[in-house]
Structures are given as structure tokens and as C-alpha cells.
Amino acid sequence: MDENRLQHYFDELGSRPLLTEDDERMLSDRIKQGDQRAVNRLAEANIRLVAHIAREYLGSGLSLDDLISEGNIGLMKAAAKYDASRGLRFAGFAVVFIRREIERALLRESAEKMAESCSDSQRRSLDAPLGSKAGVNLLSVLVDGNSPDADGRAYSAAVEERVERALRSLDERETRVVTAYYGIGQDHLTMAEIAHDMGLKRERVRQIRDRAVRRMRKVFRGLNL
């Protein structure tokens, strides 16, 4: 979205009338009765909120168009769940949903870019020994020792795809810990080094790693070669 289009878009949003508290209460009552038009009306009246939140994420990896599209998904989810009787105006209720969808999209984009940029050296790091622990690497952790592809060094495109999909199942913090600890696309770091970089305790880093590995193992083993 170029600067002129962007300004025109915000000017158009600014010309739309805001809903009053009574309006929101009336729409909320209709939403509880299953009125989809009320959901749409509530969401459409608050699109400017999405635009303003989306601007805060510019430069994070997605265009403003994409950020707004993702934010609108969150806006619609919020509108469908809104209950004015709880005493909260819709904007305050919807902001959490909008940010959640935008941040999920940014995380997916980050994971996809990491997978796409996986070079030959990065691929080798998946089956390279972890520090001084010969035979211990990410593949050896994920692969069932009794499976036909148990030899992590027998690297293939199919195994690569399974590892990348398993990595994409992680959240941002889990991804950071796993890639650092197993040296994926970077030098291997110890638990203590990761803890220092992330401002966490070493035990917390271990918990994040273990949880991430369990999730990856479940995804990895659920895929067929």
C-alpha cells in the first residue's frame, strides 16, 4: 500500500461514524441471538481500530495490507464473542483478538522464512553432533530409534520437510531456544548462554526446550515419509 493509498484509506476510515455505548449494547444483544448482520455491523464500525494497531507492526515482516487482513480476522472473532453486559467497550475487548491474529501471522511468516533460507550448511547442522556429544543432534531427538529412517545422518528431502514442519509448529520463544541449542543456522549455544541472551533462568530454558521437542516429536512422527 503506497503512501497516497494509505492516506486515502485512513481518511475514509476516519469519516465513518463511531458506535455509541448504546449501539454496542444493542448489537451485542442481537449477536447473542445469532444475528450475523449484527456481527458484521460491529466489526465494520471498528475497522479503523485494526488499521491503527496494524501500523504498529510495520517493518515486522508483513505489508500493511497483510497486517490489516490478519487483524480483521481477529476483529471478526471478537465481534462474534462480544458481550456488552460485562461492562467493557468493544474496542477494549477486541484489541486482544486483533493483536493475537497479527502476531500469529508474523510468527508463521518468520518460521516460513527461516525454513526457506535453510542452506546446505544449515541442513548439515540438523545431523551434526551437538557440541561434544557425539551422535546427539536434533534428528536423533526427533527420530524413533526403531523407525526405518533412524539414522539421522541419512538425510533426505523428505526428512528435511518433516523437520521444517515440526519447527513451524513452535512459537517464537520455542523456535529461538531450539535453533540456538541445536545450532540450526547458527553456532550451537549452551543452556547457560541461551538463558543469558534471553534473560531467563537456565532451568526455564530447559523447560522451553523440552516442551518444544515434545511438540516437534509429535508433529515429526505424525508425518509419513
Image (spheres, rainbow, N blue to C red):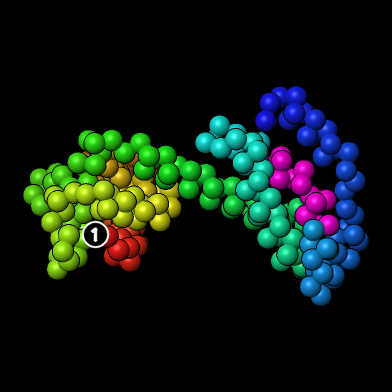
Label 1 sits on a secondary structure element that is: helix
Q: Residue at horizontal 22%, vertical 35%?
A: 121
Question: Is residue 9 on the magenta stretch?
Answer: no
Q: Examine the rendering and report whether any part of residue 51 can be seen.
A: yes
Task: Indicate the position of residue 188 as horizontal and vertical percent values.
Answer: 22, 41
Return the residue nearer the eye: 118 or 110: 118
Task: Indicate the position of residue 103 as horizontal and vertical percent values.
Answer: 55, 47
Image quadrant holding the N terminus, namely top right
Name above or below for residue 140 compared with residue 29.
above
Q: Residue at horizontal 64%, vertical 36%?
A: 64
Q: Residue at horizontal 84%, vertical 70%?
A: 29
Return the residue nearer the eye: 187 or 162: 162
Q: Examine the rendering and report whether any part of residue 56 can be seen.
A: no
Return the residue nearer the eye: 203 or 213: 213
The magenta segment: 41-54
* Residue that label 1 marks: 142
Q: Residue at horizontal 91%, vertical 61%?
A: 22
Task: Indicate the position of residue 117 as horizontal and vertical percent values.
Answer: 35, 36
Residue type pointed to by label 1: Leu
Number of other residues with Cα within 10 Å of mark 1, as a class: few under 14, some 14 to 19, many 20 or more: many
Question: Is residue 44 on the magenta stretch?
Answer: yes
Return the residue nearer the eye: 183 or 155: 155
Which SS type dominates the magenta stretch? helix
Image quadrant holding the C terminus, namely bottom left
Task: Indicate the position of residue 21 as horizontal and vertical percent values.
Answer: 88, 58
